[in-house]
Amino acid sequence: MVLLVVEALLVTSTPAVAGPGQTQLQRDLDALRELGITGALARLETTEGVQTARSGVAELDTARPVPGNPLLRAGSVTKTFVATVVLQLAAEGRLSLSDPVERWLPGVVAGNGNDGRRVTVRQLLQQTSGLYDYAYDIYPTLSTPEDYRRERWRVAHPDELIALAMRHAPADQVWAYSNTNYVLADMSINSVTGHDWTTEVREQIIAPLRLRRTTMPGTWPFLPSPHAHNYQQWTSGGPLVDTTIAVRTLDSGADGSIISTAEDLNTFITALVGGRLLPAAQLADMQTLVDTPPDPRGHTGYGLGLYYHPLPCGGGSWTHGGHGLGYNVEVTATDDGATRLTVAEFSRSFDPATEDARAAARRTLIEGAMCD
């Protein structure tokens, strides 16, 4: 497949899908796209119905709009699915959140000060284990577009990813996001059930909710149609590179590999916060928060696979995002699940200022939609 490279300047001239009489959702999505994003999508569902907005194009150098309900890389939204499965196992008495990781994975968390006897299942889901994030060792291998083209084909078994993390000493057991935690959660699911996370998610979440367009492709790196292309900008003001083909070391496992749609993701988050997937005690565990550092997204706490986002109109929303090379997705729902929203962007930048500006614009969109 030939990778398409174009100048980022072209993005800002792409017209929006809607014309006069735009909704506030459309206006906010257009404002987000105008920060240099190739294409974006939002799907808002309330008791009054469904609103969708699209902006930009599905593929650069074309006039083809973003599809109405495209397949998306959900990235780390996968963690919320996995946390739900672990909590279901806890509800069945098959494991306890207070179990040390060593009970289910003897000898796996060890070396350089790492000790599976001192890390619990709860800490894995809560991101308070102190374990090093293996992804920090992967991203330096993707420093250029040429690196991406070469490294995207590599496959790493979960054991290899944990081995990368174990080369580093653990940090203090305060909140710090680490993909390693959810690789270990998958391995724990396997130890308890005899199945990996994909089987459990399919049987316990996807099938009951009839999420017909939600899949777990494993190491298969291609995004099925219909989809918008993903584009990564390596340098500020530099070219956008087509990164629709996944990086298999980062996008194949329980920490971030689900492919879904905005419709399916809205269905999932509504069922979750509405108590359809977990008993009340386990949902309360999931929604018990530890503080997280301030960030442009507006999140103030993290539970077990869920962030909390206070809303300016009162109350709050439960949310998780996912991103990788060239894409960003966030799914969120109000406390009662009556309002739910998925926002997807089909390009990203490695420039922190650019991403902070986009996060702030996304926050404006989300808070406006949740508070309307």
Image (cartoon, rainbow, N blue to C red):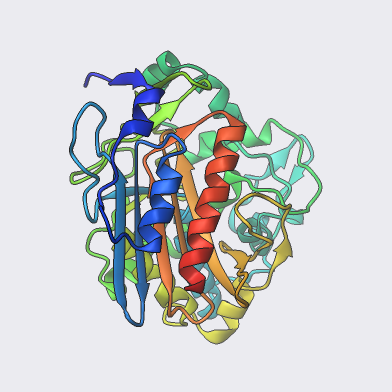
Residue lying at 62% horizontally and 77% vertically, measured from the top left: 314
- For the residue pair 346 and 280, the one nearer the viewer reads as 346
Q: Quadrant of residue 227?
A: top left
Q: Quadrant of residue 52?
A: bottom left
Q: Is residue 169 above or below residue 359?
A: above
Quarter of the picture holding the N terminus: top left
- Estimate the x, y position of residue 60 in percent, counting from the top left: 26, 29
Side of 154 where 86 appears, left or right: right
Residue lying at 40% horizontally and 52% vertically, measured from the top left: 29
Q: Is residue 146 above or below residue 283?
A: above
Residue lying at 34% horizontally and 44% vertically, measured from the top left: 218
Q: Is residue 242 above or below residue 309?
A: above
- Estimate the x, y position of residue 366 in percent, counting from the top left: 49, 61
Side of 177 where 259 appears, left or right: left
Q: Quadrant of residue 247?
A: top left
Res. 43 visible in picture = yes
Side of 220 where 170 appears, left or right: right
- Estimate the x, y position of residue 120 in percent, counting from the top left: 69, 60
- Which residue is outermost to the top? 146
Res. 188 visible in picture = no
- For the residue pair 23 and 186, the one nearer the viewer reads as 23
- Which residue is outermost to the front? 20
- Estimate the x, y position of residue 236 in percent, counting from the top left: 53, 22
